[in-house]
Amino acid sequence: MHHLSFALLKNRLHRFTLLTATVLVSLTAIPLTETNLGMVTASAQAQTTQNRKDEALRLYQVGEEQYKQSQFGEALETFQQVLVIVREIGERQGEGATLAYIGKVYLYLGQYAKALEFFQQALAIDKQIGDKAAEGTILNNIGGVYDNLGQYAKALVAQNKNNTALEIAERGRARAFVELLASKRSPNPNIQQIKPPTPPNIKQIQQIAQQQKATLVEYSMIYAPFQVQGKQEWHPQLYIWVVKPTGEVAFKQVDIKSLDTPLADLVAKSHTSIRARSADVAAVPGEASANPRRKKPLQQLHQILIQPIASELPQDSNARIIFIPQAELFFVPFPALQDASGKYLIEKHTILTAPAIQVLELTHKQKINKRKAIENRPALVVGNPTMPQQLSPLPGAEQEALEIAKMLNTKALTGSKATETTVKQLMQTVDVVHLATHGLLDDFKGLGVPGAIALAPSGQDDGLLTSGEIFDMKLNADLVVLSACDTGRGDIKSDGVIGLSRSLITAGAPSIIVSLWAVSDDSTAMLMTEFYQNLRRNPDKGVALRNAMLSTMKKHYHPREWAAFTLIGEAE
């Protein structure tokens, strides 16, 4: 908790007081020259600062006690006094702790917008001073705000205010990500002076759907209390909003508390069944037991996530659907979901995903030269670099890169030429980036941002291009394709998936293609080659990826071979 960090501050203040006292005693025995007078003045100023710190600490403790006694009005006034003092004396840790406590008071009072405002200010300070423990606490507090917003959305649904409930759900969706994107796009480097973007209202959400020429599907899981044998248990309900490019909004509520398998486990099982190829198959008389069209988890997920809204989805298979998932739903293999007849969702629809509706508005502003022919755009293509950390070579990835480089009128970087330093430099100068190599899920720097791309090491680098390093880059690329394993995965937080995909979008890429599981060399090479061939004929990346999946499916039928990749962000 933040009051613990302030306690550490108290210890430092105590040591400073002893030091100041020692200095004052020693100065009394020294003649007052001009130089010594300056020392005395500085010491007096230090003592004044110390007194102010002591006053801030005393008031902080008073505010804590008022909070515990539910005297929230008084606590707010006290913490505001603390805030004035710590800002006057430049005590950043104390300022962060005080802002966090004010946020807690507003959270308890149900003033969620105010709570978020103060938590975000505290988070910015904690990041700036490198206080990881306090940063983690603040993120948990922000998650608490979003949980409460979910309950608020539930109350609105109960009042048949479904559109307002969508606004509330979107307000809590990827807020830190949205604010980060906005700050990266701002010319003002001082994050403290950047006003966080206002969450979109229903009219703006409808405009985004029209702008994207897409049907937006946003999922939100709300936990509601139920009495079970005299005990209160919390069970999830699934809310689904469908926003059509015409502006029409539909809402469906799905009760998932009766599921035999929790939704998170069902998503995990869908990945397991895909990787196992023939496991977990529905027994159908007259059919081979290994028929991949009978994967039960994929059909169950379709029944829960798609069937309730099927009538609201576009009939034109080239019309875009952008899914905005939540929590574990980010890992749903949407293209591979199957209806009751065994037909895959990608056979009916063009599919994209996004972390939030407002992220689509921001990525739309990042687009460059979208109508320029793909083969006439500067491109970086990497395949099978000399691997770091004894990773196995990928000869199929090298062939993939060589083939794609021809289509993009460039020369592929392979082997020892594809060093991390070279790739990082070139990534920031091209329109298209294609990296065919190993993807890793580890948090190599210990910063809470997992994910890395394997490149050739050199004397200047370790060969691992991490999510954190990408985050600090400035990309001009319109499209980044990570043709590697697990590049769309990462840590699920209350704010979405933290990993390579988020870092790439934050760095400036409006469209990225990443994978949800380990992919094979042969089928991936075919899918990627088909994707770029399609893109030469049609600049719509969503349609190009869909057609590439359908073509690959004809030769490599199992979804493991073609359904791993997802397009996040802009289609054109």
Image (cartoon, grey):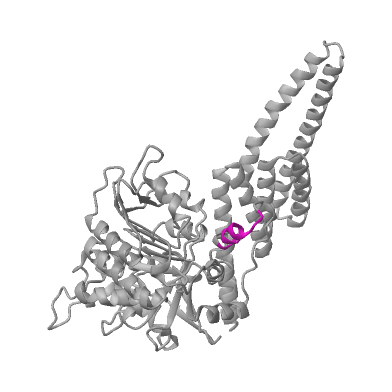
Q: Is residue 363 visible?
A: yes
Note whether 471 is above or below 223 in the view shown: above
Q: Quadrant of residue 500?
A: bottom left
Lateral position of residue 171 relative to residue 340, left or right: right
Most prominent secondary structure in the magenta stretch? helix
Lateral position of residue 457 relative to residue 222, left or right: left
Front residue of 47/418: it is: 418
Please tell me whether residue 302 belongs to the stretch shown in magenta.
no
Q: Position of residue 361 (x, y in %)?
A: 56, 71
Front residue of 535/169: it is: 535
Q: Position of residue 263 (x, y in %)?
A: 38, 69
Q: Is residue 449 visible?
A: no
Image: magenta residue range: 178-188
Q: How many marks?
A: 0
Lateral position of residue 402 relative to residue 105, left or right: left
Front residue of 32/182: it is: 182
Please tell me whether residue 185 belongs to the stretch shown in magenta.
yes
